[in-house]
Image (tube, helix red, strand yellow):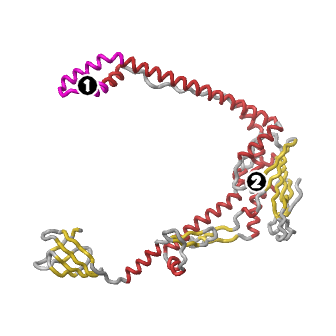
Amino acid sequence: MRFKENKSICKGPEIDFSSSITNSLGLKEISIDVNEQGLCLGAAIPNSSIYNRHQKSEYPNKSNDKNKKNNDVTRYNITLDETGEVAFYGDSGLDIIDESLKEKIKRTQLYSYEKNRQMKMNYERINAETDKFLEIYKLSPNLKDEEYFKRRLESLSLKTYKRKTFDKKEPSIKDAKKVLKAEAKQKINSWRLLKQYIMRKKYIEENMEDKLTELNVEWQGEKIKFEEQENKIESERNTSYIQEYYEEKRSLELAIKGDERYIEEKTGQWLETTVLPLDFELAYEYRKSSLLIDIKLPNIEEIPDFRAIKLSKGVFRREDKEKIDLREEYINCVFGLAVFFSSNLFNISPKIKNIVMSGYSNRLPKSQSSKQKQSKDEYIYSIKFKREGFLGKNMSEVNPYDFCRSFNHRCKISEEKYMDSIEPY
C-alpha cells in the first residue's frame, strides 16, 4: 500500500499527480492504468487517499535490458599482479572465462579507473622495494668522536626511583555522615515522612562514631598496603638503576680504552639486533685498532628487475629495467651497505681507527657458461676505511659509491657496470 495524491480540476475524471504518467480508465474505486511498465490494476478505499496497485504485465524494454547488462558487468571485479596481468572474477570469487564478458568489462569506465588504481598501488610498492635496497645508507649514523664518549661518562649519574605519595584523604565526619545517609535511606522507609526523617536522623547520630572509626581503619589499611607496594617498587627499580649505571659506566670506560674483547662482544651484539630488508652474513675480527670484516653481499637477483613509470596522462605502466641500470642499482646497494656497516661499527669505540671491509657474492663467474651452473663466492670490493674520513660528514647524505672510492680500495667495474672479481686486502 502507498499514499497517492489527486487533484480535482472539475467534476468527473481526476488527474493523477503521482510519480508515473498514466491513462486511467474506470471509477474512483477501481482503475486500470496503462503506463510505461505495462498494464496495472488499482483499487482505492472510497473517500480516502489510500489505494493498492498491482502490475499485471510488462512491456519489453530495450533500455532496461541495456541497464541490466551494464549492471551485470559492474558486478564483477578485477585484480592485477605485479606484471600488470589482469584477472577477472565475479561475486562468487570464481574466475571469469567468458571472453565476450571480459571485453564488455574492459569497455566500462570503472574498469579503466580500477585498473589504474591497482597499477599505481602495485608499482608504488615495487618502487619502494627497490628503494629499500638503494637507501640503506640513509640509516647510517654520524661519527661519534672520543670527546663524545668522555662527555657521556662525565655526565653519567645514578638514577633513583621517585616514590609516589598516598594522596587519598583521611576520612572525616562529613564522609562518615555521607555513608550513613545512604545506609539509612536503604534500611529505613516509612510512608509517614516525618517519622521516616526522625528515624534516619537518629540512625546517623547513633552510628556516627563507629562509622568514622570503621572508615579510618579501612583508610589506614589502604595506606599501609600502598606503602608496602611502593617499598617493593622502589627496591626493584633502584637495584635495576644501579645495575644499568655500572654497566653503562663500564661500557663507556672499555670503549674509550679500546678493549679488544669488549669491541668484539659489542660488535656481535649490534649485529644480532640489526634488521635490514635483505639477508647478510658478516664475519669480523679486531686487531690493534683495526676491525677486519668480510660481508656476504646480496645477489643482484634480489633487486626488482622492473619499475613503475607514470605517463603524462597519469596512467602507470610497467617497464623492465635495462641490465646496465639494474647493475648500477646493485652497485649503489652494495656500497651503501659498506657505508652503513662501517658507520655503525666505528661508533662502537673511538679506538677503532680503521675498518677493512671486503664484500663477496655468490655468483657465476663472468667467464663461465650459465649452462655449467657452478656458482662460487667472489669478492667484488675491498675498502680500507679510515676513521678521520668520516669526521664531519652527514652520512645519510653521502653518495655511497663516491664516498667508498675516496678511500684506498680494490674494485673493478666495467663500462657495462659489471663488478669483476678482485683479490681482497
For label 1, the crowd category at 10 Å Cα-Cα, with few meaning under 14, some 14 to 19 and many 20 or more, is few
Question: In the figure, is residue 144 to the left or right of 57?
Answer: right
Q: Quadrant of residue 265?
A: top right
Which residues make up the magenta segment?
A: 181-210
- Near-viewer residue (187 or 116): 187
Q: Amino acid at mark 2?
A: Phe
Q: Which residue is mark 2?
A: 280
Circle number at residue 179: none
Residue at position x 81%, y 66% in the image = 418
Q: Main secondary structure of the magenta part?
A: helix
Q: Is residue 206 magenta?
A: yes
Q: Amino acid at mark 1?
A: Ile
Of helix, strand and loop, which one carries label 2?
loop
Whole-percent x, y for residue 233 in the image: 58, 28
Alpha carbon distance from label 1 to label 2: 80 Å
Please tell me which residue is depicted at 53% across the width and 75% down the height of the picture: 96
Q: Is residue 421 left or right of residue 168?
A: right
Query: Is residue 134 covered in magenta?
Result: no
In x, y percent, where is residue 342? 78, 49
The image position of residue 266, as x and y in percent, is 77, 41
- Cβ atoms at labels 1 and 2 below 8 Å apart: no
User: Going 25% across and 78% down the picture, which residue do you hit?
Assistant: 40
Residue labelled with disc 1: 188
Q: Is residue 235 left or right of residue 420?
A: left
Q: Nearer the viewer, residue 402 or 224?
A: 224
Q: Quadrant of residue 175?
A: top left
For discs 1 and 2, the disc positioned in front in the rendered view: 1
The correct choice, above or below, for 77 with respect to 221 in the image is below
Residue 72 drawn at (x, y percent): 45, 75
